[in-house]
Image (tube, rainbow, N blue to C red):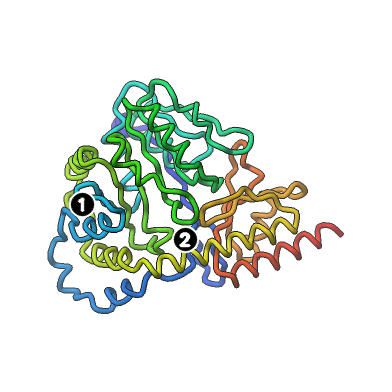
Amino acid sequence: MGAWEENVRKVTPYTPGEQPKRQDIIKLNTNENPYPPAPGVGRVLEQFDPDELRLYPDPAAFSLKEALAETCQVKPEQVFVGVGSDDVLAMAFLAFFNSERPILFPDITYSFYPVWAEEFRIPYEARPLDENFRIVKEDYYGENGGVIFPNPNAPTGLAMGLEDVEDIIRHNPDAVVIVDEAYVDFGAESALPLVEKYENLLVVQTFSKSRSMAGMRIGFAVGSPKLIRYLEDVKYSFNSYTMSRLALKCGVEAVRDNAYFEETTARIRATREHAKRILGEMGFVCTDSMANFLFVTHPEYRAADLFQALKEAGIYVRYFAKPRIDDYLRITVGTDSQMEALYGFLRDYLSRRQK
């Protein structure tokens, strides 16, 4: 090791879902929306003047904040935007988690949380989910340096009721509580109405799932004006121009088309509930997911074997070789035709293995 390497910050990075180069696949491994973005987004892309790219974008991203504020029924000064919710969350870790006390999050959850904590030298404790993969709200009482949890949780898909979410916030008046709502639009109740009541609450959402814009990278947070000002200070200490002109215009159009948003999320919810029934008939056990994915196990077949067999057949799902969940698969809800292909393969696989 060279002397210079002694001063390198070494971290274990987050591992994203595989992005296969093959074209002839069914991709159900990264929770992307199977439907295109709102039609207005397509019109922006068709009409966008490339000459705009020589100009810096609005550093305040006001047009997008204004559209989001209207949708979320808050003021623009209560909205923060970033390059995907990962960017927003990373800024929030830097801005709010600076106590010597550990921050708290579930042991089975979004695996970026411990990565950020280690990278930013933030002490943390992972609180175990119960035997049914539920968050135990009482585990988040008492002194801490901050709290973060997804609702619905990932990869389990299970959602907490708003009363329990508020109970955690109420028991943490001296710390910032972040509710990560990447999947909230598929069946859970948002904590956005609590923002006016709790100055220390930050609600984070994304355009990557329910608004079909994972490739555009847009995320946002809603909180008290004071919290948002602190977040903006951190953002501007890194980069004033985080949102491109094209992203801002596309984001505004996506937010404005609420009818399309409601239509596509309803289709995904319907497909998800149908999938729970079909997989259950095959002997799979599914959590009651409120997200755009399923978390499933089969008592007679190893998840690792199923994962590999599906991959060889060109159907990509997600497998986590981690304690407590290493016999589960996370399956993104695709189109009805994609899901039928999944069911067909699984029926054939189970039938062949039973012979």
Residue closest to the eye, 338 or 50 = 338
Where the C terminus falls, by quadrant? bottom right
Dot 2 or dot 1: first in sequence order is 2
**Residue behind mark 1:** 76
Q: Residues within 10 Å of mark 1 (few under 14, many from 20)?
A: some
The residue depicted at 41 percent of the width and 64 percent of the height is 212
- State left or right for residue 100 relative to residue 346: left
| Label 2: which secondary element | loop
- State left or right for residue 27 relative to residue 230: right
- Considering every residue shown, the one lying at the far right of the view is 355
Q: Nearer the viewer, mark 2 or mark 1?
A: 1
Where the N terminus falls, by quadrant? top left
Residue closest to the eye, 298 or 349 = 298
Q: Amino acid at mark 2?
A: Glu
Residue closest to the eye, 282 or 354 = 282
The spot of residue 272 in percent (x, y) is 58, 60
The spot of residue 157 in percent (x, y) is 54, 48
State the CA–CA distance, disc 2 to disc 1.
28 Å
The residue depicted at 65 percent of the width and 57 percent of the height is 276
Residue closest to the eye, 33 or 135 = 135
The residue depicted at 19 percent of the width and 48 percent of the height is 77
The spot of residue 264 in percent (x, y) is 46, 67
The image quarter in which residue 3 lies: top left
Q: Amino acid at mark 1?
A: Pro
Q: Is residue 46 above or below residue 287?
A: below
**Residue behind mark 2:** 32
The spot of residue 307 in percent (x, y) is 64, 54
Q: Is residue 156 above or below residue 168?
A: below
| Label 1: which secondary element | helix
